[in-house]
Amino acid sequence: MKQLIQTLKESHIIVALGNQAIVIAVAADVCSATPLEAPDADATMIQAVALTQLPDGSMTYAVARSSKQLQIFRDKEMAASYVTPKRVSSMCFALVADDQHSMTVVVVSDLAGDAIAYSVEKGLNDSKDDEKNQETNCRLLLGHTASMLTKVLVHQHYIVTADRDEKIRVSYFPDTYRIHGYLLGHLAFVSSFDVHNNACASAGGDRMIRLWDLVTCKELASISTVSDENANDQSIQPIPTSILWDALGNYVAVIYDDAVYVDFFVWQNESISHATRVECQAQPLGLARRGSSQFLLLIRDPPYLQELQMDSTTDKSHLMVAQTTQSRIRHTLEESIQKLEITDIPQSVLERDNTGNVTIEKHSETRGPTHTKPWENVSRVETAKARNRRFKRRKRGSYSDNDEEEDAEGDVTIEKHD
């Protein structure tokens, strides 16, 4: 998974295409784009980007690369660098505060299933080559055993993490050793989620959109993203890659891998339903919200950015989404990409192996009939248990004629299922 676009209010946008991160600043009468350039000129592909504003007013940006470099920029100047244990899949900024002081950290999720916090303020004054300082300025928050994290988000006093093992974990922040609960229901990897107040919306490889109560950890509603005519053909069912609430928590927007459209779903009367579909100009790579009613789509081909303006009436089931044709932001980004000569643009945010399979998907596991994996057959399990009981009785010296009959039955059963 990749996180290639993020916004802060209406004034700042960070975008990653290929090996270049670009910051767009939007003011009343001017729109400017600035590339984030590191002194060591690391040209590896970008995995994730994030941005925040520190309490002193300075803008801070984080860029994670496939080389495992985590770069921190303050006001567009390189300020610190870390080396992460594994490649980063997602990240966000968070404020850790107590009665005495507060500090800003960037929380990353990686492909080893760990969520790690890296200090921003301390890192600004430390040498990036000082390994001792790096160990001091980072902390392992939590881990998903033998899994791979797909997203991390700090929301109020929770830290929410999703993984490839169909689950979303809700822990307390910063006391991450305290687990609040799990959101269980997806039948494949969780590709994305978003939180609005106490409502969590998630999407996954099972092609389902699910809504949850973050406090009770109960599922509220669900809907399939698969159309009826494609229900039996897995190969033409696009995988949701990003989901995002609108500012009021009435709608969720969803983009997909290998599909040039964005779907809007409406949440009303304790149920979720499809509201409208908007065609994209190219394959969407990222989704971000700007302001109260605007969505930004990062797309693979020119003009690279698509702006959608929402306009809902009093009846939430009637949603109008208009595309902005004249945009300073889009023009500024496209101009910057041409100037930087960025050509190595990712084809997708999902990684695939040499055979074309999505690497995060568990192709080797099955949940279906036992003939595909006979060791899951219930009768074979019972036979194994009976064999174990007989072995223990032999050791105790209490073997009887009845056990000989059970042996014979067990042998027949074993031969039958081999």
Image: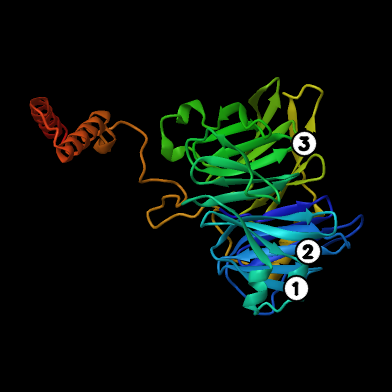
Name which residue type carries label 2.
Thr
Name which residue type carries label 3.
Met
Q: Residue furthest top?
A: 269
Q: Nearer the viewer, mark 3 or mark 2?
A: 2
Mark 1 touches mark 2? (CB < 8 Å): yes
- Label 1 environment density (alpha carbons within 10 Å; few <14, some 14–19, many ≥20): many
Position of residue 196 relative to residue 34, above or below, is above
Nearer-the-camera pick, 157 or 226: 157
Residue at 27 percent of width and 29 percent of height: 378
Q: Residue furthest front?
A: 397
Mark 3 touches mark 2? (CB < 8 Å): no
Q: Nearer the viewer, mark 1 or mark 3?
A: 1
Dot 1: what SS? strand
Residue at 67 percent of width and 38 percent of height: 253
Rendered image quadrant of residue 400:
top left
Which percent across, then down, holds residue 231?
Answer: 45, 29
Position of residue 188 relative to residue 117, above or below, is above
Nearer-the-camera pick, 321 or 101: 101
The label shown at residue 275 is none
Which percent across, then down, holds residue 236?
Answer: 45, 38
Mark with earlier residue (1, 2): 2
Mark with earlier residue (3, 2): 2
- Label 2 environment density (alpha carbons within 10 Å; few <14, some 14–19, many ≥20): many
Mark with earlier residue (1, 3): 1
Residue on which disc 3 sits? 310
Residue on which disc 1 sits? 79
Name which residue type carries label 1.
Ala
Residue on which disc 2 sits? 60
